[in-house]
Image (tube, rainbow, N blue to C red):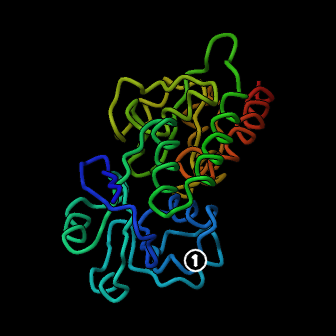
Amino acid sequence: MPVLTDPFGRPLPLHPAPRRIVSLVPSQTELLHDLGLGDEVAGITKFCIHPDSWFRSKPRVGGTKTVHPDRVDALQPDLILANKEENVREQVEALAERYPTWVSDISTLNDALQMIRTVGALVHRAGAADALAMQIGAAFAGLGTHSGPLLRTGYLIWKDPYMTVGADSFIHEMLGYLGVANVFADKRRYPEMSPEDLSACELLLLSSEPYPFAQKHIDELQRDLPGTRILLVDGEAFSWYGSRLLYTPAYFLKLRQQIAAMG
């Protein structure tokens, strides 16, 4: 029987096809839908908002970091999909003692494409997953390279305190594809920043998630950073690493135009 291992060496049999999948990762939940699964997905989290039909109808096992073991037990999954960063290690390891569990670890586009292929193999949709990964890869290749100096850019994911992204994050990789330079690339993970730190930015991107930045936050920051271009952006385009990546390059092209129009 073929056996697959996750990034942490956990063995997972590839046969038979799973029939009661619990996904603890929003972007991977959407991927399952786009690979053609339906009733095979038995449970999701309260943050798995795509597709909307699943969000409204599938049993929810808690949040990405607050999984309720009793809700998972009630579903008796034959496969759990988790993520190293989005889920809590102790919670996932406890579930892995009882159920087959695969854990993704994503920090680059290549990681994401490999995850798509691996999930496709796990759920017996390898052909569809390979085609999707190739399509996404081609779309990103079509972005080309940015000519000229790159704008020194900060990307905010949180407020009170302000938090940004370091070089070892998936969002950092996406900033590179957008064609800007992460001014906090010397940091790791998601460091806290003071308003004074943000003054190093020529461009400041305010994400729609996890913190719901809005126009009022632009106005607030602009008072302290009058020379900085500040823009609200779709956080899903920068941080969802499943099938939603298919639409990210087109969004980045529009965003480049929007940034250029700001002068």
SS of the residue at dot 1? Answer: helix
Residue type highlighted by circle 1: Phe
Residue 196: x %, y % from top left: 42, 30
- Left/right placement of residue 52 relative to residue 81 reads right
Q: Nearer the viewer, residue 31 or 16?
A: 16
Placement of the N terminus among the 4 image quadrants: bottom left
- Name which quarter of the figure residue 32 lies in: bottom right
In the image, farthest residue toward the front: 1
Q: Position of residue 107 (x, y in %)?
A: 42, 39
Question: Does residue 164 sit above or below 102 in this rendering?
Answer: above
Please give the name of the residue rendered at 48% of the width and 42% of the height, measured from the top-left corner: 114
Q: Residue 80: horizontal and vertical position, in percent?
A: 37, 68
Tell me the residue at 59%/76% (across/down).
Answer: 38
Q: Which residue is mark 1?
A: 55
Q: Residue at 23%, 59% (x, y): give it.
A: 89
| Nearest the eye: 112 or 35 | 35
In the displayed structure, 121 sits above or below 175; it is below
Task: Examine the image and state in which quarter residue 188 appears.
Answer: top left
Give the quadrant of the C terminus.
Answer: top right
Residue drawn at x 37%, y 33% as measured from the top left: 168
Left or right of 21? Residue 221 is right
Relative to 91, is 233 on the left or the right?
right
